[in-house]
Image: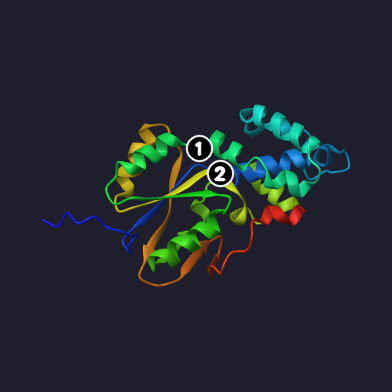
Amino acid sequence: MNNKKIKKVEDNYDLVLVSNIGISGCLKVACAKKSEILKSDVHYFSRDFFNRDFFKKYSQVIKILTDEYEKSLSLEEYLSEYSEYLASLLSNEKAIEIAKSFKDSFIYPLGVKGINQVLWDIAKENNVGIFMDIDDITISRETIELSDFYSINPYELESFGATIIATRDARLLMKTLNEAGIENNLIARCTKEKKVIIYGNNIRRTLKPPKIDSIQKLI
């Protein structure tokens, strides 16, 4: 019996996403642009935008980020700060612990990179292809609305708290995560074709080298 540990992701691996993408980036943008969003002439957002459950869940974070934004010298300074704070607050240590218990699993926190960059890194570092269904990416309505309004690509948005787990046993991993109450979704499969293929929403395209975090467009 071959018990040799696999050293890299192979073409028979599945990719499981833990948590929603773009939460930390969404919170940063919402706090920096709160007064603009609340203006009566901005009809894109509903008047109860900041009263939604999403923002109630992170009310303490929003208060801290809003206060710090008001004290910062520039938007650039504000956007570059507090990554460690958000990473600590949004981290899912239980999911990481569960992933580590699976033999030959590999853990890829999205962090400041965003999901497109991490998918690109997985493919290049392991010399595999990736076939991903974009409809399976979990993303909040609030992140989508902010991204649309400010012309931000949510798939290139800072995503602390979200993690991709590469595994050979996605079914059991997802069952274990579900039993622990951890949100997760199967989003992609690694292939022998050396490309990152994205499909869904009536599209099929090859991922090109991602750009910098889209949040920088606000600077």
Residue 140: x and y in percent read 60, 43
Amino acid type, residue under disc 2 in the picture: Phe
Q: Is residue 77 left or right of residue 13?
A: right
> Please, which residue is most extreme toward the right here?
41
Residue 145: x and y in percent read 69, 47
Q: Secondary structure at mark 2?
A: strand
Closest to the observer: 85 or 209?
Answer: 85
Residue found at x 30% / y 43%: 172
Tell me whether the residue at label 2 lies in contact with that at label 1, contact meaning CB atoms closer than 8 angstroms: yes
Say which label, 2 or 1, has the lower sequence index.
Answer: 1
Amino acid type, residue under disc 1 in the picture: Ser
Q: Which residue is mark 2?
A: 160
CA–CA distance in space, label 2 to label 1: 7 Å
Q: Is residue 48 visible?
A: no
- Identify whether 189 is placed above or below 158: below
Residue found at x 53% / y 46%: 138
Q: Is residue 146 visible?
A: yes
Residue 188 picture quarter: bottom left
Colour mode?
rainbow
